[in-house]
């Protein structure tokens, strides 16, 4: 449909009106794909209008909307339904190494359920061949690896294996889980090495960055991988293409891009741009790149790179490191850990080289100055109204003299007549010369007043500069060709003994004398003697290549073909030093930095001399001829035939006609592989063809460069984002998007609504912390069947295996929430802050608090929550400035935690007759006592009394006032009383006063329903204290629930109370925070006791007046 809409948009044009567009949609039909769903629609024709309606989309009634829908449909169609085909290995947090081993073992042991075929491990060709033997494929389908793979994994046998894997591993069931496990199994069978020794450039033991690939088209890597898979018995020859496609789609999708020019070789500048473009596009839309063309990828590069700067930076570092290794700028390191200095030097060299190539392209594009054109330009400035006279020969050049009779006469000093163009080109040097003419139209007065135009001198300077620029450009291009040649070629040229040869030819005359020279071959032949072997190469500007040739061709020789004599002559460049052409000792460095080497410079200089830019004929043509030149026989018109004898002239014309590099310019690429585009409709790449090639090429290059990566800096490896370099792949392509979504949850006012929506669809969905490869990180998980599963916000579904040790954000911890001053966690942070705020250290602490940046802290990673920040703050040896930063950030994190738990409470307690008074002890402690590890028991106890007294709202107001200004005397007294109460009731036995029982959540709700009088229930989890109950006012019940982490809920509606309490204690997001035990029937269990206000007066360690004062005194 996308192509049909695009074609319609082009036909209608930008000015099409809404009625015209709608009528065209109604009358234009398209053929449905044979693989369409439902199957009965396959092969049918349907109108665009009907199909758009079927998709539930509005009809586009403007050209802009029509074009936009076309682009959207085409873009969507390029994204594979299964993403990058990585399955479980491409989850935001992929399978661990142990889990991958289990997947592979289960898959390799899989047997035919009918017992007709051997196990997978016993099948020659292994898993893909196992599936193929049970899945008849249509003839020719293997020629389309993507479709063949889809047929195999969609087969009943494939689905059975995928489901077996999921069930065995206890993975959560989703609409894609079967495929996820199956794809992972196939990949891990093909590439078991990645489980224990992963490397981003090694696929199934095949090194994509091996030096044998350098300088070769990218298609050779795909071919090489297929052969490797067969040779290593990882799959059958029939399935090699399918296996390679699957592996590359997940690991190196850039190699699957369609229509990549052969000139885009591994390690070239064009390869750098393509690799970065492909990686950033793939990161935004996994699975898309493999279905795109080269041009489409490059056009999408700019927006994709800007979408995620951090990811783009990582991609740029990886690609540029590979470029540096392939080009001899960096030594290869298996661990990829390069220092900041190494990366800075690498970036400097890359940018310098790119600047050289850009300047070279511009210099080769530029015309050689023409004295005639320069003179015409000056004439047009001075005589804009007399252009018709410029070339009419009506002027005479004379010198004024006194005659014998004392009169005034004129003597001709340059035979004419001359034109105004002649005059401007000549710049006659004599100051006393005058112009005369019988033609009254000639501007004699102006010419005589100012006879000089400055053209002659300007031409000489501009021509010399242009020639030098073109020499430098050709030098750069030859250096580029050598550096991008396969390693064996540029090592030959770098270290062998070299000799140069030129190929000449001429035709013999019919008589005894006379010959007619032919254009000299623009190729420079180089003979190489190295390690006792002679090889030869032809360096060609026209072909844009260094081609191996038979050695005998690069030697002095002569042969005759009828009347044509062919000669190969040795070529010794001017200033040649034979010693520099001798064989060189190969150093330990591999490969050589050929672009910058002395030997490459020598060869490039020789080629520049070979193309003969200094040939006088080039300048003569550029100078043109005036009447004076003809008078002096200074020169004759240079014929095209003579100019074509000069190699540079032939090569330059070849270049400007768009014939360089075997069609590079037909793709809108310059000599160095940079894709360019002009100001075309919809920004499409100019297709250069026909006689307009030269003009179109120039426009394309000067208007816009497409897909060129922009580098500012490269950062060394660090943090979880680089954890894929190590013992296992820890994060998948969706991880950064999950972090981005998590940041959105933290920062957006409606962010918690997204969690609520996910919770309604999948079950309690919460933010929390868990470990990824031993590194604690924050993420989102879904609670299903008493297991937490990671949540993918992009796909909006849980995935994977149960998380071990998921700790929901806002959930209390027993060892931390007892509030005593000697608690180690309390003391560690308290002492660090105390030390950082001494008189000596306070200035540094304050500076960190006010202006310090979190990213400066050692050990900090993006996305850290309050528990992780607290661990950083508790660490020994923290500097005062660091403690200032951490105190600020931990305070903010606690406040966000409080807002989060209160939001969960509001989402769980909804409906008529429900009111919520938000409060969180996290916010209170953030302001009052940052090292505190919680005061939930004391706050709950004080709230129980306040509810009895009817002063619960005043208690919350007091808590908030103390939070806002904790330093006043009254507020300090309040905080001290509350801390003393916490110390008295912190233990479960003290909180319940010895009368607790353990019941299911439903029994708590039942007690609230059946109590005929006011009652307050103390509720305890393994590590947290809360309240629930009922108050009878004027014969009417008002139910309540209080969580010191979230706030106070009141219910006056029975149905709202039952529903709300069930979610708060059992099925909702708030309940998922509770660390509860289970009853024998599997229900959440809580320890409960009934609060008696009289206990406040009769308990040792509790000051009843102080407790009452917490809620009865207005602060």
Image (cartoon, rainbow, N blue to C red):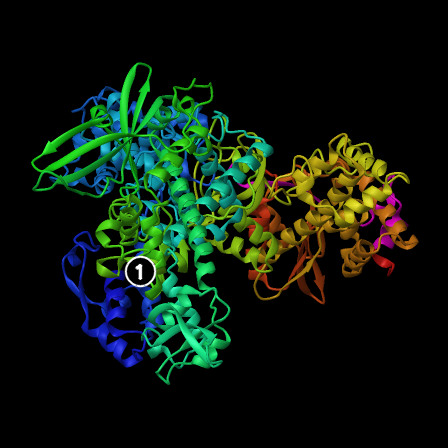
Is residue 1055 visible in the rendered structure shown here?
yes
User: Is residue 400 found inside the magenta-colored segment of the image?
Assistant: no
From the viewer's perspective, tell me whether residue 276 is left or right of residue 131. right
Range drawn in magenta: 1081-1110
Q: Position of residue 631 (x, y in %)?
A: 32, 62
Closer to the camera in the image, 562 or 1069 = 562
Q: Secondary structure at mark 1?
A: helix
- Based on the displayed image, in which of its 4 quarters is residue 749 positioned? bottom right
Q: Which residue is mark 1?
A: 696
Q: Quadrant of the N terminus?
A: bottom left
Residue at the far front: name it.
Answer: 405
Q: Quadrant of the C terminus?
A: bottom right
Q: Position of residue 299 (x, y in %)?
A: 37, 54
Residue at the far bottom: name it.
Answer: 440
Q: Position of residue 153 (x, y in %)?
A: 26, 38
Give the residue drawn at x 56%, y 35%. Answer: 345
From the viewer's perspective, tell me whether residue 814 is left or right of residue 364. right
Is residue 85 visible in the rendered structure shown here?
no
Closer to the camera in the image, 1022 or 769 = 769
């Amino acid at each position: 449909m996308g192509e049909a809409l695009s074609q319609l948009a082009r036909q209608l044009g930008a000015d099409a009106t809404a009625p015209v567009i709608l009528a065209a949609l109604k009358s234009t039909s398209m053929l449905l794909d044979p693989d369409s769903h439902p199957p009965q629609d396959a092969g049918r024709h349907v109108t665009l209008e009907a199909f758009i309606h079927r998709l539930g989309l509005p009809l586009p009634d403007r050209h802009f909307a029509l074009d936009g829908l076309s682009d959207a449909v085409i873009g969507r169609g390029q994204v594979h339904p299964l993403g990058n085909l990585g399955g479980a290995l491409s989850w935001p947090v992929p399978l661990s190494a142990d889990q991958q081993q289990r997947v592979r073992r289960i898959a390799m042991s899989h047997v035919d359920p009918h017992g007709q075929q051997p196990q997978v491990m016993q099948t020659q060709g292994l898993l893909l061949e196992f599936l193929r033997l049970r899945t008849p494929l249509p003839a020719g389908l293997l020629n389309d690896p993507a479709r063949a793979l889809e047929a195999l994994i969609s087969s009943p046998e494939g689905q059975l294996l995928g489901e077996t894997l999921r069930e065995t591993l206890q993975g959560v069931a989703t609409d894609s889980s079967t495929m996820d496990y199956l794809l992972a199994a196939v990949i891990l069978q093909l590439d078991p090495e990645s489980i224990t020794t992963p490397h981003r450039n090694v696929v199934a033991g095949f090194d994509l960055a091996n030096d044998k690939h350098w300088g070769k088209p990218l298609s050779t890597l795909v071919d090489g991988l297929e052969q490797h898979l067969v040779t290593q018995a990882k799959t059958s020859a029939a399935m090699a293409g399918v296996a390679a496609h699957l592996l590359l789609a997940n690991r190196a999708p850039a190699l699957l891009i369609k229509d990549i020019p052969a000139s885009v070789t591994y390690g070239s500048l064009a390869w750098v741009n393509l690799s970065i473009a492909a990686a950033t596009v793939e990161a935004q839309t996994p699975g898309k790149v493999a279905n795109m063309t080269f041009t489409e990828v490059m056009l999408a590069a700019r927006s994709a790179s800007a979408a995620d700067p951090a990811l783009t930076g990582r991609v740029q570092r990886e690609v540029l490191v590979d470029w540096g290794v392939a080009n001899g700028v960096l030594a290869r390191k298996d661990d990829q850990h390069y220092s900041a200095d190494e990366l800075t030097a690498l970036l400097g060299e890359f940018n310098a080289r790119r600047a050289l190539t850009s300047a070279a392209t511009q210099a080769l594009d530029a015309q050689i100055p023409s004295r005639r054109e320069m003179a015409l330009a000056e004439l047009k400035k001075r005589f804009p109204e007399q252009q018709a006279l410029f070339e009419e020969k009506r002027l005479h050049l004379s010198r004024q003299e006194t005659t014998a009779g004392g009169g005034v006469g004129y003597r001709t000093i340059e035979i004419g007549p001359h034109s105004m163009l002649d005059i401007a080109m000549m710049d006659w040097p004599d100051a006393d010369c005058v112009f005369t003419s019988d033609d009254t139209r000639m501007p004699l007065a102006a010419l005589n007043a100012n006879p000089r135009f400055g053209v002659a001198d300007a031409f000489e300077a501009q021509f010399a500069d242009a020639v030098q620029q073109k020499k430098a450009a050709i030098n750069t291009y030859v250096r580029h060709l050598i550096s991008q040649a396969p390693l064996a070629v540029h090592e030959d040229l770098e270290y062998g003994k070299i000799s140069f040869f030129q190929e000449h030819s001429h035709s013999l005359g019919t008589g005894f004398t006379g010959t007619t020279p032919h254009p000299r071959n623009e190729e420079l032949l180089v003979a190489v003697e190295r390690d006792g072997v002679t090889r030869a190469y032809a360096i060609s500007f026209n072909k844009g290549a260094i081609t191996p040739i038979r050695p005998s061709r690069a030697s002095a020789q002569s042969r005759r073909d009828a009347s044509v004599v062919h000669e190969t002559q040795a070529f010794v460049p001017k200033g040649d030093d034979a010693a520099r052409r001798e064989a060189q000792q190969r150093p330990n460095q591999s490969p050589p930095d050929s672009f910058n080497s002395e030997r490459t410079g020598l060869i490039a200089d020789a080629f520049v001399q070979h193309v003969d830019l200094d040939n006088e004929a080039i300048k003569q043509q550029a100078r043109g001829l005036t009447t004076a030149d003809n008078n002096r026989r200074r020169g004759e018109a240079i014929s095209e035939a003579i100019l074509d004898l000069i190699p540079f002239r032939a090569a330059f014309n070849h270049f400007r006609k768009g014939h360089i590099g075997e069609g590079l310019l037909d793709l809108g690429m310059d000599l160095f592989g940079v894709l360019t585009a002009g100001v075309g409709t919809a920004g499409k790449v100019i297709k250069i063809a026909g006689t307009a090639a030269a003009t179109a090429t120039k426009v394309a290059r000067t208007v816009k460069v497409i897909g060129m990566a922009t580098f500012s800096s490269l950062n060394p490896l660090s943090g979880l984002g680089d954890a894929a370099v190590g013992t296992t792949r820890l994060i998948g392509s969706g991880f950064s998007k999950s972090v981005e979504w998590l940041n959105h949850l933290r920062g957006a006012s409606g962010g918690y609504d997204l969690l609520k929506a996910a919770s309604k669809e999948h079950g309690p969905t919460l933010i929390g912390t868990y470990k990824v490869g031993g590194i604690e990180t924050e993420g989102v998980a879904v609670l299903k069947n008493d297991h937490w599963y990671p949540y993918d916000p992009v796909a909006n579904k849980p995935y994977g295996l149960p998380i071990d040790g998921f700790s929901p954000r806002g959930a209390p911890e027993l060892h931390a929430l007892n509030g005593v001053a000697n608690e180690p966690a309390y003391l560690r942070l308290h002492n660090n802050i105390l030390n950082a705020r001494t008189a000596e250290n306070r200035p540094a602490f304050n500076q960190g608090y006010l202006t310090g940046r979190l990213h400066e802290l050692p050990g900090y990673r993006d996305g850290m929550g309050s528990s992780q920040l607290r661990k950083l703050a508790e660490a020994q040896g923290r500097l005062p400035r660091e403690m200032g930063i951490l105190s600020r950030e931990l305070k903010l994190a606690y406040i966000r935690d409080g807002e989060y738990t209160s939001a969960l409470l509001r989402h769980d307690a909804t409906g008529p007759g429900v009111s919520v008074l938000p409060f969180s002890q996290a916010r209170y402690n953030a302001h009052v006592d940052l090292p505190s590890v919680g005061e939930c028991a004391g706050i709950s106890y004080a709230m129980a009394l306040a509810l009895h007294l009817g002063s619960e709202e005043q208690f919350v107001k007091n808590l908030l006032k103390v939070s806002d200004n904790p330093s006043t005397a009254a507020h300090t007294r309040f905080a001290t009383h509350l801390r003393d109460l916490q110390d008295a009731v912190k233990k479960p036995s003290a909180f319940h006063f010895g009368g607790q029982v353990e019941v299911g959540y439903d029994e708590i709700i039942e007690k609230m329903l059946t109590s005929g009088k006011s009652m307050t229930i103390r509720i305890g989890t393994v590590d947290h204290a809360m309240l629930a109950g009922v108050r009878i006012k004027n014969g009417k019940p008002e139910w309540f629930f209080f969580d010191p982490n979230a706030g106070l809920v009141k219910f006056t509606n029975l149905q709202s109370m039952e529903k709300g309490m069930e979610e708060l204690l059992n099925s909702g997001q708030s309940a998922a925070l509770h660390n509860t035990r289970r009853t024998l029937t599997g229900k959440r269990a809580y320890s409960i006791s009934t609060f008696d206000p009289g206990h406040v007066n009769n308990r040792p360690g509790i000051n009843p007046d102080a407790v009452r004062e917490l809620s009865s005194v207005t602060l």
